[in-house]
Amino acid sequence: MKRKILAIVLVLVLVLSCVAAFTACKSKKTDAEYILDKGTLICGITLYEPMNYFNNDGDLIGFDTEFAEAVAEKLGIEAKFQVIKWSSKEIELNSKYIDCIWNGFTVTEKRKENITFTQSYLNNTQCVVIKASNAALFANEEACAGKRAVAEAGSAGETAANELTTNVTPKGAQVDALTEVKSGTADFAVVDVVLANSMVGQGDYADLAIATGIQLESEEYAIGFRKGSDMAEKVNAVIADLLADGTLQTLAEKYGVAGQLIK
């Protein structure tokens, strides 16, 4: 009798364990379900023109800002924006503090190991920014050797800067790198040409220039989601719609990046 009771108990335990395991598997949401169910897409950004920045009225605008809002609207959710430390972007993403990295995010093979990217949407290159008065000193890449460089920490610019000189200081943002060159505490900065075209040679950075004799490798921007996320494909479908109906072309023209739009 005791053996029969023990056998029945073991069977019940096994059945309950299987039910619990099945329920757990069934209730586990995909990344897209998680984002769509909560109704918000939290985009990790840094602030720089023309991608994400505040206008004179204090409103967040920019190509990536309006692009994200257009995608979210198509998905029936709301885009929200969280300024992050760029060097910690993958930590922020995997902890679900943000849902994606959407801020002129360069696609690299190394990043693909930990990130699921959407299709690329803008072409970009890194460029060297210097004081305009020092143009003659930066005729080619070799001229950068030994000079003081700055770039945003964790960026493609930092990687490029380290290939040009051994004296590189990482900064919190690309605009901080420009400020260092302007103040003379750095000899050159390596930043996105999208940023440089928008800011260099005008306003507070009127005395800076792009070193035209130095040509760095081209790259592409895409939106980064958690590794294995099914949200990337859903966003790709919306991007196709926004390209087809001219929305992205209009936004690109508005923010001066029409020549870099990938169609």
Image (cartoon, grey):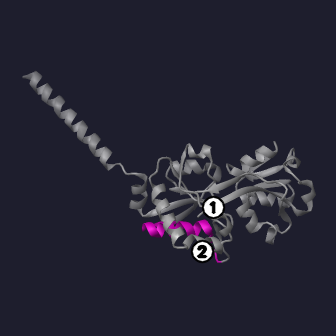
Left or right? Give the position of 151 relative to 2.
right
Q: Amino acid at mark 2?
A: Thr
Q: Amino acid at mark 1?
A: Leu
Q: Percent from the top left, x then y, of residue 189?
A: 79, 55
Q: Residue at x 9, y 25 (%)?
A: 4
Vertically, is 199 above or below 14? Answer: below
When asked about the image quadrant of residue 126, the answer is: bottom right
- Residues shaded magenta: 57-79
Q: Percent from the top left, x then y, of residue 191?
A: 74, 57
Left or right? Give the position of 47 relative to 116.
right
Q: Residues within 10 Å of mark 2 (few under 14, many from 20)?
A: some
Question: Magenta segment: does it hold 60?
Answer: yes
Left or right? Give the position of 4 relative to 168.
left
Residue 257 visible somewhere in the drawing: no
Q: Percent from the top left, x then y, of residue 108?
A: 63, 48
In the picture, the disc for residue 250 is 2
When asked about the image quadrant of residue 54, the answer is: bottom right
In the picture, the disc for residue 122 is 1
Q: Secondary structure at mark 1?
A: strand
Name the foreground residue: 193 vs 162: 193
Tell me which numbered mark, 2 or 1, is placed earlier along the sequence. 1
Q: Residues within 10 Å of mark 1 (few under 14, many from 20)?
A: many
Question: Magenta segment: does it hold 91?
Answer: no
Name the foreground residue: 141 vs 162: 141
When asked about the image quadrant of residue 123, the answer is: bottom right
Q: Residue at x 68, y 64 (%)?
A: 48
Q: Quadrant of the N terminus?
A: top left
